[in-house]
Amino acid sequence: MNFTKMHGAGNDFILLETSDVNRNWSQMALAMCNRHFGIGADGLLLLLPSDVADFRIQVGMGKPGFGVKDIPVVIEPDDRGLVDIKPMLTYSITIQGRKLLLNFVSMGNPHAVYFGQHPVSEFPLSQLGPQIELHKLFPDRVNFEVARVISRRQIEARVWERGVGETLACGSGACAVAVAARLHGYIDSKVDIKLPGGILGVEWDRVG
C-alpha cells in the first residue's frame, strides 16, 4: 500500500489515493492510525477521483454533542435538579456590557457560537474572545466563533481558538457553526463557511 504521511499545524495525517469508496474505511482508519500497531496518525485522508480537480476530500468530523458534560459547560440545574437542553442553543451572557446569545456545541472539543447581524470583521474578537474563552461557564475553556448568516448556503465566521487566539481557519469551528445554524433553521444541510483563511464546505444530515 502506497501512502503519504503529512502534517498540518501539528496534526499528522495519512494520505491515500484510491477510487474504492465501498471499503470500510472507518475500520481501516482505526487500524492504520494506531500509534503502536499501525502507521500512526491523527486521521486518514482519502484522495478520491474528481471531474473538476486533481482529487476530492471529505472529512468525517463525528457526531456533535450538546450535553453539559459533552462540552463541558457549567449550567445550574433547576429546582428538580435537571438541566434543560434549550439554553445550550440560546444561552445569554453579558461581556463588557454586550449581551451575547451563545450556542454550545461539542465537536470533540468545546465551542460557543454567536450569530450576529453585522459583518464579522466588525466584531471586537480580540477583546471579547479571551473573556469568553476563560469564562467561568467553561471549566476546560472554550473555542469561540462569531458568525453571520449570509444566505441558506453561506455563512461568514471568525474563530478564537482556546490557548491560541484568532486563527485563519478551524475545521471543528466551521462544523460547530454549521450545526448551530441548522438547529436554528438558518440553513439547509449543506453550507459554505467563509473564514479569513478560505472557504470550508460543511454538510450535516442530522442523522444519528
Image: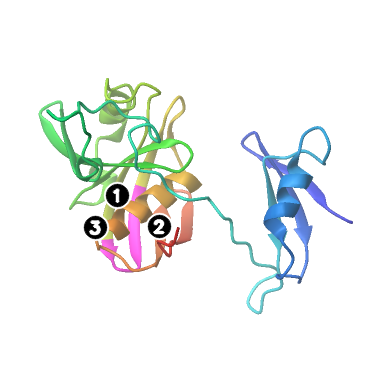
- Residue 30: percent from left, percent from top: 71, 46
Quarter holding the N terminus is bottom right
Question: Mark 2–mark 3 contact, CB under 8 Å?
Answer: no
Q: Is residue 197 left or right of residue 20?
A: left
Cα–Cα gap, marks 1 and 3: 13 Å
Q: Which residue is mark 1?
A: 147
From which residue to which does the magenta span run?
150-157
Disc number placed over residue 106 in the picture, else none: none
Q: As shown in the figure, which amino acid type bears the numbered disc 2?
A: Ile
Q: How many dots with numbers?
A: 3
Q: As shown in the figure, which amino acid type bears the numbered disc 1?
A: Ala
Check disc 1 and report its element: helix, strand or loop: strand
- Which mark is in front, 2 or 3? 3
Check disc 3 and report its element: helix, strand or loop: loop
Cα–Cα gap, marks 2 and 1: 9 Å
Rendered view: 111 above or below 134: below
Majority secondary structure in the magenta region: strand
Residue 17 vs residue 109, the one in the foreground:
109
Cα–Cα gap, marks 2 and 3: 16 Å
Q: As shown in the figure, which amino acid type bears the numbered disc 3?
A: His
